[in-house]
Image: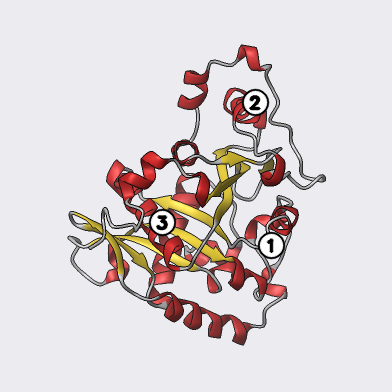
Amino acid sequence: MTLDLAQTIAPVEIAQKTVAVAGRSGTAVLGRIGNLETRIARSVTEIDAAQAVRYRVFAEEMNAKLSPDAVRRKRDIDAWDMVCDHLLVLDTSIEGDAEEQIVGTYRLLRQDVAAVSGGFYSQSEFDVDALIARHPEKRFMELGRSCVLPAYRTKRTVELLWQGNWAYSLKHGIDVMFGCASFHGTVPEEHALALSFLHHNVLAKDEWSVSARPELFRTMDLMPSEGIDARKALSAMPPLIKGYLRLGATVGNGAVVDHGFNTTDVLIVLPIGKISGRYLNYYGADAGRFAS
């Protein structure tokens, strides 16, 4: 990451925004399946617990290189945490406080909040400004830092995360979701099949086109289209990216290597109007399928 949000927001402002954003988004449960439920974090302590879950996944499991302070605290944390809303999945069967029940999380940043808080996280890797400028009438929301603890990487956990995203988007009048999604490792060529499939088949075009920043651009066009086995390419995709594609998402042009997180990133673009009708019917146009 090259954009330092912390330099643009004073510490007092950060603390104020944390409370304001959490309060503004409400505390209602957005969905429930069995003992799992999804909602927005209600307190700074719940955000801290979500950061601990992210640390376990990104640092301990995926070997992300975090700051010495993050390692000492065992938290994946940056200044965007203080201006985002944090979608949680909680296992209510776990005894103890809500902080101990958090098993998955997603970070949500609405355009109106980003505009007064230093911008979007993905702007440091992709030319998001150009994309947004072409759609002044639409409201964008960035999705990021998605992770789930290993024991909970099941269909119903993923369904609840999407239930939460969809309900939140409806509540705030969001028109477009976007955000970075990652392949593990910093050598794009190791993902030649999957990246080439994305480049040849689901590249965002015309009014939705967006590209990696020139100084960071790594080509995804690593194999000719006629040499790509679609089934094998899809099986080589990380589950999160496959999930986005099923919903109807496209990807930006070019990948970016993030050495700090040990990933190769692509930009996902998902206009609400292009979400597959099958999935809208599944979750409900009013997000009522899994509503509590």
Q: Which residue carries the number 1 mark?
A: 136
Q: Earlier in the sequence, mark 2 or mark 3?
A: 3
- Does residue 149 appear to the left or right of 244 in the view shown? left
Separation of residues labelled 2 and 1 (CA atoms): 28 Å
Residue mark closest to the camera, 1 vs 3? 1
The residue depicted at 37 percent of the width and 53 percent of the height is 161
> How many C-alpha atoms fall within 10 Å of the one at disc 2: few (<14), some, or many (≥20)?
some
Relative vertical location of residue 199 with respect to residue 79 in this rendering, above or below: above
Q: Which residue carries the number 3 mark?
A: 166
Q: Secondary structure at mark 3?
A: helix
Q: Secondary structure at mark 1?
A: loop
Q: Can you give x and y, in whole percent of width and height, for residue 215 in the image?
A: 82, 46
Give the quadrant of residue 255. Answer: top right
> How many C-alpha atoms fall within 10 Å of the one at disc 3: few (<14), some, or many (≥20)?
many
The residue depicted at 59 percent of the width and 46 percent of the height is 269
Relative vertical location of residue 105 with respect to residue 113 in this rendering, above or below: above
Q: Which residue carries the number 2 mark?
A: 200
Separation of residues labelled 1 and 3 (CA atoms): 22 Å
Q: Earlier in the sequence, mark 1 or mark 3?
A: 1
